Image (spheres, rainbow, N blue to C red):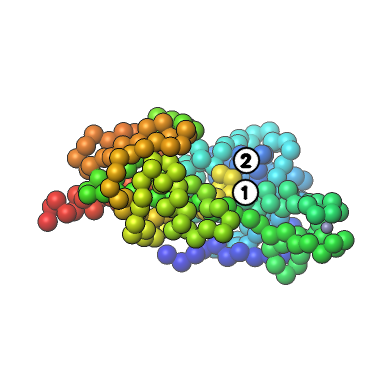
């Protein structure tokens, strides 16, 4: 699939009527009839929007607003999975992360002076001390742990709902991703893993994660819940009754479905 979105930089650009605009109130996207609210809905509020690139040749802007105009609704990006066109949802995730970065680096974290957008790259620079600030993403690993035809699913206390999912955790400075996978599995369920293989990745703008998916094989031993955030963890075989699973738009669900499909195909052979 070609990438229809082309990132671009032009701090002086302002949105015209043809622009595709992503306006946020906090972390909620302003929408009209399940489409992003446009320049015609935002009026003057659109004037300070940041240009971030082109989608199918259309200039794309993002802005953060304090007030929601009349006749405009707002919704969190999670709620908009399945409601907003998937391509637009992806660009909305980028827009949100960029507008948040732009807003939260208006002042230098080192010396406190105001920063200015750079013309040639996606950065804000401090003229007083020379520091530069780039958009930041937080890498997290997410992994399907499996052993002898079964996969491990766990329930985290912080999940919004009663579902079970694969394990996940943030990358520590200095770690290789495979090391994070091994450390997190050991810390959460007390198992050693080998054969850590890359699966795929997904941008997860809640607020700015990059989820990097893996499949890993657990060694022998019992599940030992070592992390107070994990309420329950169990092995599941494809024929078992499965607990509620994460939503269909997440890489966690893709990791689970991939396991169920592979087992199903093996049976049919
Ligand atoms: Zn500075």
Ranked by sequence position, the earlier of labels 1 and 2 is 2
Residue 201 visible in rendering: no
Q: Is residue 242 above or below residue 200?
A: above
Q: Is residue 27 above or below residue 97?
A: above
The residue where tag 1 is placed is 96
Q: Position of residue 38 (x, y in %)?
A: 64, 47
Residue at 32% of width from left, 43% of height from top?
152
Residue 269 visible in rendering: yes
Q: Position of residue 11 (x, y in %)?
A: 75, 61
Side of 75 relative to 213 (left or right): right
| Quadrant in the picture for the N terminus | bottom left
As rendered, which of 216 and 206 lies closer to the eye? 216
Residue at 34% of width from left, 48% of height from top?
145
Q: Position of residue 111 (x, y in %)?
A: 84, 54
Res. 164 image quadrant: top left
**Quarter for ligand 1?**
bottom right
Q: How crowded is the residue under tag 1: few (<14 C-alpha within 10 Å), some, or many (20+)?
A: many
Q: Position of residue 110 (x, y in %)?
A: 80, 54
Distance from the alpha carbon under mark 1 to that under mark 2: 7 Å
Side of 35 relative to 214 (left or right): right
């Amino acid at each position: 699939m070609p990438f229809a979105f082309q990132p671009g930089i032009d701090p002086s650009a302002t949105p015209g009527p043809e622009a595709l605009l992503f306006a946020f109130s906090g972390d909620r996207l302003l929408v009209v009839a399940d489409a992003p609210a446009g320049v015609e809905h935002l009026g003057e509020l659109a004037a300070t929007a940041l240009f971030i690139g082109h989608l199918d040749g259309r200039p794309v802007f993002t802005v953060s607003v304090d007030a929601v105009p009349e006749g405009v609704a707002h919704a969190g990006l999670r709620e908009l999975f399945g409601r907003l066109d998937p391509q637009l949802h992806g660009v909305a995730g980028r827009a949100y992360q960029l507008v948040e970065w732009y807003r939260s680096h208006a002042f230098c974290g080192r010396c406190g002076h105001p920063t200015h957008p750079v013309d040639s790259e996606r950065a804000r620079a401090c003229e007083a001390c020379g520091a530069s600030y780039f958009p930041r993403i937080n890498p997290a690993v997410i992994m399907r742990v499996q052993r002898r035809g079964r996969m491990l699913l766990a329930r985290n206390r912080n999940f919004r709902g009663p579902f079970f999912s694969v394990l996940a955790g943030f990358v520590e400075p200095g770690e290789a991703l495979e090391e994070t996978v091994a450390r997190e599995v050991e810390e959460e369920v007390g198992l050693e893993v080998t054969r850590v293989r890359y699966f795929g990745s997904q941008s997860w703008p809640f607020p700015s994660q990059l989820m990097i998916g893996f499949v890993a094989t657990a060694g022998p031993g019992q599940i030992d819940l070592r992390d107070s955030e994990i309420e329950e963890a169990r092995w599941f075989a494809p024929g078992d009754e499965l607990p509620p699973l994460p939503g269909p738009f997440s890489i966690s669900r893709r990791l689970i479905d991939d396991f169920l499909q592979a087992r199903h195909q093996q049976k049919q052979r």
